[in-house]
Amino acid sequence: MGVLDILQSKTTGLPECYRQMSESEMVSRIEAIKRKMGGQLYLPGHHYQKDEVIQFADDTGDSLKLAQLSAENAQAKYIVFCGVHFMAETADILSSDEQTVVLPDMRAGCSMADMADIHQTEKAWEILQDTLGDTIIPLTYVNSTASIKSFVGKNGGATVTSSNAKAMVEWALTQKERILFLPDQHLGRNTAYDLGVPLDQMAVWDPIANVLESEGPNEDVRVILWKGHCSVHEKFTMENIRQVREDMPGVRVLVHPECTFDVVQASDINGSTKKIIDTIENAPTGSSWAIGTEMNLVNRLIQTHPDKHIVSLNPNMCPCLTMNRIDLPHLLWALESIADGEVINQINVDKETANFAKIALERMLERSI
Ligand code: 13P
Ligand code: SF4
């Protein structure tokens, strides 16, 4: 489901009473509902969520961990997902029919996921099959709609997250001559390059012009990258790295692999949000770090590690606006609606889409620890 579908869906806005409520009132009401509902309620929270929300999470994690936990949690009747739309869809696909998944604000989408729609993907697949034959396996980053995951599952492929992209691309290249990697060109390029695929064996699929942008002959292409990106992570630049190395001698640059190829190459370490957190937790006291990822996480790391000198790689960075849509008023609204027996903002992936999307997710989960 893309942003347009969400806006056209029957989503009611936040009632006025929640806008007027004090923070302490909202906190105590959320605590009371959590106490009352106990194990019936499960709140997974992505590392990019605001502190005001993450304080209530039963578990926090990167996309992979949250997908694994959603698949494992059989007892919660309600999963109130504190993250973005594609993550809640994944939880719905992996949970049972008896479980209800709720996203506190339906506007919490992901601009990257919206960069590949199913019609564009089917068109691309048709053209690529005509040009290159049955030589391609599709892989999609979990940051994609359920329809894209379903398409990938139907065509023999799998999902990937930033934690397991390397293992999944390696696996995919043993299945077919080429991969089509949706929708993040940067994660695809960074991962394939790490595995030894040279840049001249990668091409970019432009879904607007319907053309394969390739330097050399099409037959030499092993990795086809969908022309999508994260507008948050693209804001980290080579100039940011040059400046921080000048300002903070000895600084280590740690970035998410959604950053551009040049930035990842010029960094010291790259990895998922979990890898970023683990790296900082294990870093020596007094060490200096410039982190290239979403600001809620960077600010949390600054607060929880006062013994280390941590800055955002881009000093003028904004948070991910869609992740930030989940706030105290929306969380309370979602929880009170459940407690009152009138569930709002339920995520419901239709059966057929969910069946094939689940196959793509399971191919990933069985290859991930
Ligand atoms: P992780 O899988 O590393 O948590 O990243 C999710 C995401 O949306 C990054 O922008
Ligand atoms: Fe999507 Fe980028 Fe936000 Fe992650 S940071 S949820 S990829 S827009």
Image (cartoon, rainbow, N blue to C red):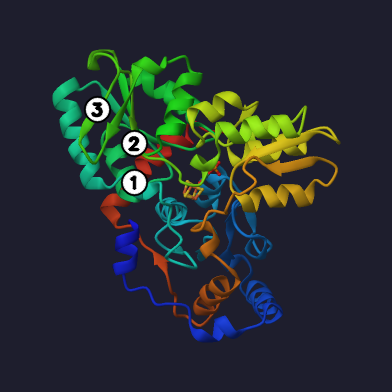
Query: Can the viewer see residue 76 in this picture?
Result: no
Residue at image point 16% right, 33% down: 126
Identified by mark 3, the residue type is Leu
Query: Can the viewer see residue 190 in this picture?
Result: yes
What is the CA distance from the residue labelled 3 to the residue labelled 1? 16 Å
Using the image, tell me which numbered label, if any, was put on residue 212. 3
Q: Is residue 357 above or below residue 191?
A: below
- Quadrant in the rendering for residue 237: top right
Q: Position of residue 207 (x, y in %)?
A: 25, 39
Q: Position of residue 42 (x, y in %)?
A: 58, 62
Q: Position of residue 310 (x, y in %)?
A: 75, 42
Q: Position of residue 260 (x, y in %)?
A: 49, 32
Outermost residue on the left side: it is 130
Residue at the spot of label 2:
227
Q: Secondary structure at mark 2?
A: loop
147 lies left or right of 52: left
Instruction: Of the two numbered discs 1 and 2 on the same chain, state the one appearing first in sequence.
Output: 1
What is the total number of numbered labels drawn onto the structure image? Answer: 3
Q: Secondary structure at mark 3?
A: strand
Q: Secondary structure at mark 1?
A: helix
Q: Is residue 17 above or below residue 93?
A: below
Using the image, tell me which numbered label, if any, was put on residue 115. 1
**Disc 3 to disc 1: CB gap under 8 Å:** no
Residue at image point 47% right, 14% down: 196
